[in-house]
Amino acid sequence: MQNTRLNSLVDVASGRFGQWLSNPWRRISLLVISVLFGVFLGSAISTIAGQRANLDISVAAILVVLTEAISWVVYAANRRIANSLLVQILNSLKIGLTYSLFVEAFKLGS
């Protein structure tokens, strides 16, 4: 690839963003935000799927497939891929989503 101004600008910006994310507190804050967004997403999905009764089975199947795919990438892959920030954010989102769905199930059961 040619070394254009745009290419060098993107390389410098991604390098600085990577250095910014290398701070452990910023990384943990991103993971906590993704867990909280997963909780919100789980609540929103269950509310939307509950409104239309014909979407329950298809939404549940999609969520199971996505959850299992993320778990497969996180736990079956090599350590280098599993320790990347994007994979950890996806895993945190999955954890928050699963937690929210359990909370919604307990609310409906009581």
Image (spheres, rainbow, N blue to C red):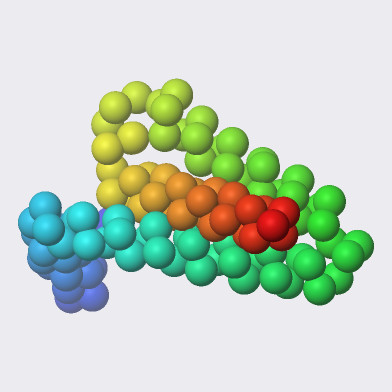
- x, y percentage for residue 61? 76, 46
**Residue 4 seen from this side:** no
Farthest-out residue, front = 110
Side of 67 relative to 2 (left or right): right
Q: Which residue is drawn at 34% across and 46% down?
A: 88
With 33 as the anchor, is 12 left or right in this view? left
When asked about the image quadrant of residue 13, the answer is: bottom left
Q: Quadrant of the N terminus?
A: bottom left
In this rendering, is residue 38 above or below 76?
below
Point 69% across, 64% down: residue: 46
Residue 84 location (% of width, % of height): 28, 43
Nearer to me, 51 or 11: 51
- Residue at image position (30%, 56%) is 31
Instruction: State how many labels appear.
Output: 0
Left or right: residue 11 compared with residue 89:
left
Residue at x 21% of width, y 55% of height: 28
Q: Is residue 76 above or below residue 73?
A: above
